[in-house]
Amino acid sequence: MQSSPSTTADTPQSPSGGAGLKRALGLPALVLYGIILIQPTAPMPLFGVAHNQAHGHVVTLILIGMVAMLFTALSYGRMANAYPSAGSAYAYVSREIHPAPGYLTGWSMMFDYVMNPIICVIWCSKATVDLGATIGALHVLGGTIDLGLLHRIPIQIWFVFYAALFTGLNLRGIEASTRTNAILAAGLGVVILLFFWAAIRYLFQNPPPDAAAFTRPFYDPATFSWKAISGGAALAVLTYIGFDGISTLSEEVHNPRRNVLLATVLVCLITGVLASLEVYSAQLVWPKPASTFPSLENAFSHVAGLVGGRTFFIVVTASLLFATIGSGMGAHLGAGRLLYGMGRDNAIPRKFFGFVNPRTRVPSNNIILVGIIALIGAFTLSYDLGAELLNFGALFGFMGVNLSALIHYYVRGRDRRMRQLIPPILGFLVCLYLWVSLKSLTLIIGVCWLIVGVLYGAWRTSFFTRPIQFAPIETEDETAGNGRQPNA
């Protein structure tokens, strides 16, 4: 992190006149934070499922997803300036457009937040079984440890284990520190570099049969299908989930008007380029159909095993396992906090969802509920369906953020330049296209969830005759009036 000498402008004042949050984060620190949130290995767990759905065009999926997220990142950065203490699609849509679509956005975002720990439980469980099957007996200090036991334990037991692990650690209020996350991201970065080196060495020793092989990961005329690409691109958005977390640090950033926006866009761009290189290398190494992978969920590790042997397979699988455990815990806690935010506003019952444990300072009711949902979801959903349901909620929320930015800065604002009009419209349209390109089953389940939300919202508000009372948050104008550095 970067810091600078404290100044009046860099130390925000609270409304009561006391010291507020210190502005200590520069642009490099924000970008690093965003990359840590997403994880540099983000496309690896998704690789096999995306490869199967898009008939091998994983690089194309990642690049299409990057374009969609870049436009949305612009809108997130702009809305973070307008509402520096909000930091969520639910809050932006509720305050900027109307409480009713805001409530529906929050309801749909539950899919995003709740599905994330579900797919993390599924992936961790399958990776553990896969790891045990590969390692088998391990000789340590003259003795033998039979890690093949991991493979013989039914996967349903691992579902219970990981759901309980995420729930228990979050109930204890255990959060990974920034330093721990940075160390993990650095370790994953080393693993990625080792993979690139091993892949390049393998390709030199086993060169592709012709020059066309180098372009097939982008476009293969024998398997290309625009319908498959569209559905796969919606799935590939999962690679970028988490970039919006940068907006929650608006009050701790030097020059937030510039840096939050730049950091959000740069994180999406860096993630897209790195992810494209990772999956491009993997596809060159393993040009065969997805059906040839021993495990779709852990396909990238099998590519690593091909280029680096059994030891490298174990290293990559273990690294991804640790990273996904961290992501699962964070997603679990994030889901609990989203439910708490809606409960605090009494959009859902405040007595249950708005409760915070006075000792651990976590929304314990929500943490337990999300743990139960994650366990049930692991037993009933596949990884790819869970990922699509996650993106159903995320893309719905992203559309809301783009509309909020359009209304705030172009419709209601004084700036009528095209830069305030074109990016949010393009962001909305691309997200809408990806949203309707999800599988039919995903759309049916998602729309049913939205209908349930509408019916529940109608009941809570006497058929929308009573408004939802939102907790107060500051806008950019109110922030300036309180003596803080304006974020407009």
Image (spheres, rainbow, N blue to C red):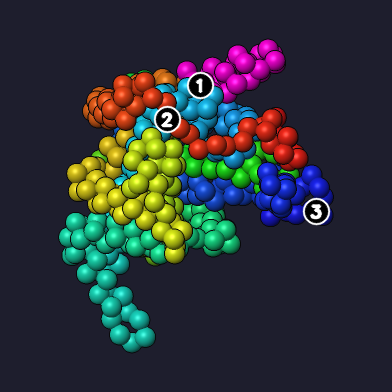
Q: Secondary structure at mark 3?
A: loop
Residue 27: where, in percent of width, then height?
A: 70, 44
Instruction: Name the residue tied to disc 2.
Output: 468
Q: Is residue 163 left or right of residue 187?
A: left
**Residue 388's quadrant in the figure?**
top left
CA–CA distance in space, label 2 to label 1:
14 Å
CA–CA distance in space, label 1 to label 3:
37 Å
Residue 141: where, in percent of width, then height?
A: 37, 86
Instruction: Name the residue tied to disc 3.
Output: 6
Q: Which amino acid type is marked by label 3? A: Ser
**Residue 422 inside the magenta-drawn segment:** yes
Q: Nearer the viewer, mark 2 or mark 1?
A: 2
Q: Compare residues 455 and 289 and report the one nearer the observer.
A: 455
Q: Compare residues 435 and 23 and report the one nearer the observer.
A: 23
Please determine whether, in this image, residue 153 is positioned above or below residue 229.
below
Magenta stretch in the rendered image: 403-429
Identify the residue at horizontal 82%, vertical 50% (top origin). Answer: 7
Instruction: Name the residue tied to disc 1.
Output: 97
Q: Is residue 167 left or right of residue 380?
A: right
On the question of residue 289 being in view, the answer is no
Q: Quadrant of the N terminus?
A: bottom right
Q: Compare residues 203 and 228 and report the one nearer the observer.
A: 228
Q: Are marks 2 and 1 in contact (CB under 8 Å)?
A: no
Which mark identifies residue 73? none
Q: Quadrant of the C terminus?
A: top right
Q: Is residue 486 left or right of residue 165?
A: right
Q: Which amino acid type is marked by label 2? A: Ile
Identify the residue at horizontal 61%, vertical 36% (top origin). Answer: 474
